[in-house]
Amino acid sequence: MILRAPRFLACALLAALPAVAQQPAPAFAPPNLAGKGIASMAASCAACHGTGGRVVAGSAVPGLAGRPAPELAKTMGEFKSGQRPATVMHQIAKGYGDAEIAALADYFSKQPR
């Protein structure tokens, strides 16, 4: 009797396999850019550009807070493509997709200076 339970379970799983295999694959969902998603992306920017994109006085790194979203997105695109020279931003920008860049630009444009 003890040997029958594992065999029964294996047979039940094998019987259900064709039904599972016929299910459509889930559609790709883009990353959640709202809430914690954008907050975690912006947190990585804070290391150089300050919390909320506000740099400390006298910083050589430009602040991002309150700048127009199209300008921020264009600049990130230039870093990503290599058109704009940089020390590290060209590498960082390559890690973001267009939707993420747009979300970051929107986020920083709405931050107070």
Image (cartoon, grey):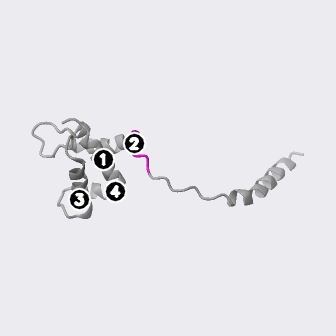
> From where the camera sits, is residue 25 visible?
yes
**Position of residue 68 measured from the top left corner of the image (x, y, whole percent):** 21, 47
**Position of residue 85 measured from the top left corner of the image (x, y, whole percent):** 17, 60
Q: Based on the displayed image, in which of its 4 quarters is residue 94 positioned?
A: bottom left
Q: Based on the displayed image, in which of its 4 quarters is residue 23 positioned?
A: bottom right
Q: Report the residue marked by disc 2.
A: 34
Q: Report the residue marked by disc 3.
A: 79
Distance of label 1 from label 4 (alpha carbons): 10 Å
Residue 47 lies in the magenta-colored region: no
Compared with 43, 77 (above or below) is below
* Element on which disc 4 rests: helix
**Amino acid, disc 3:** Phe
Which span is picked out in magenta? 31-37
Mark 3 or mark 1: whose residue is earlier in sequence: 3
**Position of residue 45 measured from the top left corner of the image (x, y, whole percent):** 27, 45
Q: Mark 4, residues whose alpha carbon is within 10 Å: few (<14), some, or many (≥20)?
A: few
Mark 1 or mark 4: whose residue is earlier in sequence: 4
Q: Quadrant of the C terminus?
A: top left
Q: Which mark is residue 98?
A: 4
